[in-house]
């Protein structure tokens, strides 16, 4: 007998049990959602009061005093020897505008980084000061001395002497900061005393004007007097030193810049140890590679790297690096651009032997360089080729009117006595040469990485480039002693 399927109805109690389980799942999901909302809420604090209480005792106001000379009495007002000269001198003396020196004061901010009294601020806050006074959150005031300063990063290290251990803050990892993270700026804006402002990281790795710039951009209110003050993360670690603002009127418009702590700590360590910075020096003049230069350099596949425009006496020349080499790698790190290479070299220990990979004549070579010290580097002396006697001529080529260097042109343009090449005497304003920035007075010393002694040399280089099917030619141009490469179209 075959078994028969039996339909068993679900009891009411079982139905209730299923509903209960479904309700439990819904409750669990609701709890997870609430926890997620709580985590999100934690990312935006209800108050910065606890953080401000934690860090404020370590932030200081800095007052500097400087002696400046006043303008000389009545000179420029009345002729010397005039019968009114004594009258104007007496008047200016009464107004405090005589020849007596006067005192000038300035305000800034800083922060303590050790219990024994080391204080960090901006170099421009204390530069040239005769007296420096540090005021603490408690109201105590102490005189400070300068341990060392670095104009390149605008960082200075001060020292105060205190009988009691001082409250201090520690540096955090600026590279760990993300765009959108909360930050807190503390300082002395516009001389108003201790003040706190909050914002976010607007962007990282900003460069303003220096080779070693690595700024954190923030919308936390930063004004005059905030210079040298700290920028904190939410853990109370210093991730930047407030240095500059971008503003049309001198007040905060939400674009402030703080030097990244990972730059500052390297500077501070050297200032503490040596009283000065000691940056690595490779000894080359370099330039970024533009898109139109890639096609003119054999073996180059993109714009990454830095092309060498000049090699003065120094570590690079001793190691065999040549002008026109493209530096692709330094001490195991790929080179992206000039700024990155300069920072990497500067952060490398003086005297260290490093491997430098260069592209030369379409092939890579690895050279070993022992770094010098940048601060001791002498001014670059351009290496020049010997010039054969040439009858001066003039010719218009690629929108440029050029003529070989003569003694008269050397004197007129202030060129080196041994300078060779072609002088640009005129530029067609409708040409690509004008668009690329070439101007009368420029000296073209190389074309296609070969020295130019005559106009026929340039003609030959252009013909070679055209025969090779190239659309542009690479020129090495000197202006005011500074070399740069320009890729000029041949069409």
Image (spheres, helix red, strand yellow):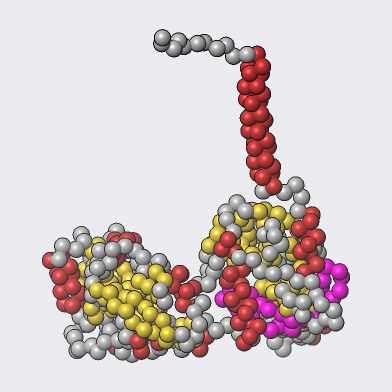
Percent across and percent down for residue 98 are 78, 82
Does residue 482 appear to the left or right of 164 in the view shown?
A: left
* Residue 174, placed above or below residue 271: above
Quick one: 170 or 119, which is closer to the camera?
Answer: 170
The residue drawn where x is 44% and y is 72% is: 341
Percent across and percent down for residue 363 are 24, 74
The residue drawn where x is 80% and y is 83% is: 161
Q: Is residue 229 something one can see in this rendering?
A: yes
Most extreme residue toward the front is 1
- Main secondary structure along the magenta-highlighted residues: strand
**Which residue range is magenta in the image?**
135-160
Does residue 1 appear to the left or right of 445 in the view shown?
A: right
Q: Give the quarter of the image for residue 11.
A: top right
Percent across and percent down for residue 428 are 28, 63
Quick one: 99 or 474, which is closer to the camera?
Answer: 474
Percent across and percent down for residue 156 are 66, 77
Q: Is residue 419 magenta?
A: no
The residue drawn where x is 83% and y is 81% is: 162
Q: Give the quarter of the image for residue 251.
A: bottom right
Pick the quarter of the image with the C terminus: bottom left
The residue drawn where x is 77% and y is 77% is: 115
Q: Is residue 155 magenta?
A: yes
* Residue 164, placed above or below residue 206: below
Quick one: 46 or 246, which is closer to the camera?
Answer: 46
Pick the quarter of the image with the N terminus: top left
């Amino acid at each position: 007998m075959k078994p028969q399927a039996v339909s068993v109805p679900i009891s009411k109690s079982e139905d209730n049990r299923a509903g209960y389980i479904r309700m439990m799942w819904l409750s669990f999901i609701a709890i997870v959602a609430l926890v997620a909302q709580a985590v999100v809420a934690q990312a935006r604090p209800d108050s910065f009061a606890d953080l401000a209480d934690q860090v404020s005792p370590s932030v200081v106001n800095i007052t500097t005093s400087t002696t400046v000379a006043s303008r000389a009495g009545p000179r420029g007002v009345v002729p010397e020897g005039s019968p009114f000269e004594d009258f104007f001198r007496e008047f200016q003396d009464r107004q405090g505008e005589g020849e007596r020196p006067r005192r000038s004061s300035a305000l800034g901010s800083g922060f303590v980084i050790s219990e024994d009294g080391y204080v960090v601020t901006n170099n421009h806050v204390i530069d040239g000061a005769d007296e420096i006074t540090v005021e603490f959150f408690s109201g105590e005031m102490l005189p400070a001395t300068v341990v060392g300063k670095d104009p390149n990063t605008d960082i200075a290290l001060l020292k105060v002497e205190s009988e009691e251990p001082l409250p201090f803050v520690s540096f955090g990892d600026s590279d760990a900061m993300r765009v959108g993270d909360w930050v807190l700026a503390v300082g002395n804006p516009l001389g108003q005393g201790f003040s706190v402002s909050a914002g976010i990281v607007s962007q990282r790795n900003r460069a303003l004007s220096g080779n070693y710039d690595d700024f954190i951009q923030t919308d936390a209110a930063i004004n005059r007097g905030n210079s040298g003050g700290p920028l904190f993360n939410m853990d109370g670690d210093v991730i930047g030193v407030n240095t500059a603002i971008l503003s049309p009127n001198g007040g905060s418009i939400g674009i402030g810049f703080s030097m990244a702590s990972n730059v500052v700590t390297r500077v501070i360590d050297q200032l503490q140890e040596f009283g000065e910075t000691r940056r690595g020096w490779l000894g080359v003049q370099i330039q970024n590679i533009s898109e139109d230069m890639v096609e003119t350099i054999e073996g180059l596949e993109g714009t990454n790297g830095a092309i060498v425009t000049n090699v003065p006496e120094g570590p690079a020349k001793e190691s065999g690096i040549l002008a026109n080499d493209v530096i692709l790698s330094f001490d195991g790190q790929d080179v992206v651009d000039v700024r990155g290479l300069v920072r990497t070299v500067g952060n490398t220990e003086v005297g260290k032997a490093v491997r430098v990979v260069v592209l030369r004549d379409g092939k890579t070579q690895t050279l070993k360089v022992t770094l010098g010290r940048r601060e001791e580097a002498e001014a670059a002396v351009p290496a020049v080729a010997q010039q054969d006697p040439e009858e001066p001529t003039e010719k218009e080529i690629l929108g440029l009117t050029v003529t070989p260097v003569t003694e008269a042109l050397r004197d007129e343009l202030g060129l080196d006595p041994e300078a060779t090449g072609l002088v640009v005497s005129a530029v067609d304003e409708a040409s690509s040469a004008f668009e690329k920035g070439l101007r009368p007075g420029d000296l073209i010393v190389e074309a296609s990485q070969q020295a130019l002694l005559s106009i026929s040399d340039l003609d030959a280089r252009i013909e070679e480039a055209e025969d090779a099917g190239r659309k542009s030619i690479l020129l090495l141009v000197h202006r005011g002693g500074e070399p740069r490469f320009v890729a000029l179209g041949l069409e």
